[in-house]
Amino acid sequence: APNTSAAGDILDISAVLDLDDSTWTDGNNLAFAIANGFVSFTNSGGATQVAVDIDGAGLAFVSTALVVLTGVNPLTAATDLTDNIKLD
C-alpha cells in the first residue's frame, strides 16, 4: 500500500498540469484542483484511478487517467493524498 503520510510516496503531476493550453495556476492546492475539475479520483476495480484535466471544468480537454493506486480508498483519496500529490 502507498505511504500516504506527509513523508510518504509522492505522485508528481505538475508536468501534466503545465502542458500547453493548461489553465492551471501554480500555487493552488489539491482541494482546489478537485473542486475545479483538474484532478479526480474514481473507483477502478477497488483501487483508485487518478485522472487529470488540464483545463479543469473547461470544455476544450477531457479528463485523462494517469495512474491506478492500490491500497487507496477512492472515497477518501482526496483527504488521504493531500500531502502526496505534487501539483506544481
Image (spheres, helix red, strand yellow):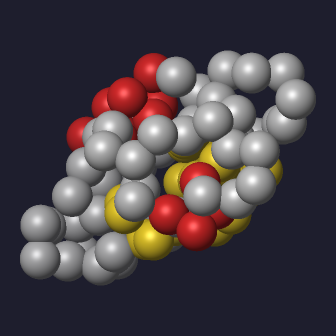
Residue at (70% x, 59% y) in the render: 19
- Which quadrant would residue 43 be assigned to in this image? top right
Residue at (43% x, 71% y) in the render: 11
Q: Position of residue 4 (x, y in %)?
A: 23, 66
Q: Position of residue 34 (x, y in %)?
A: 46, 31
Q: Position of residue 69 (x, y in %)?
A: 52, 67
Q: Position of residue 70 (x, y in %)?
A: 49, 69
Quarter of the image with the N terminus in it: bottom left
- Which quadrant would residue 53 be assigned to in this image? top right
Residue at (29% x, 64% y) in the render: 84
Q: Is residue 36 left or right of residue 8?
A: right
Report whether residue 26 is seen: yes
Rendered view: 4 above or below 74: below
Residue at (33% x, 38% y) in the render: 28
Quarter of the image with the C terminus in it: bottom left
Q: Is residue 40 left or right of residue 31?
A: right
Report whether residue 46 is seen: no
How many discs appear?
0
**Between residues 33 and 65, which one lies in front from this camera angle?**
33
Rendered view: 88 above or below 59: below
**Between residues 68 and 46, which one lies in front from this camera angle?**
68
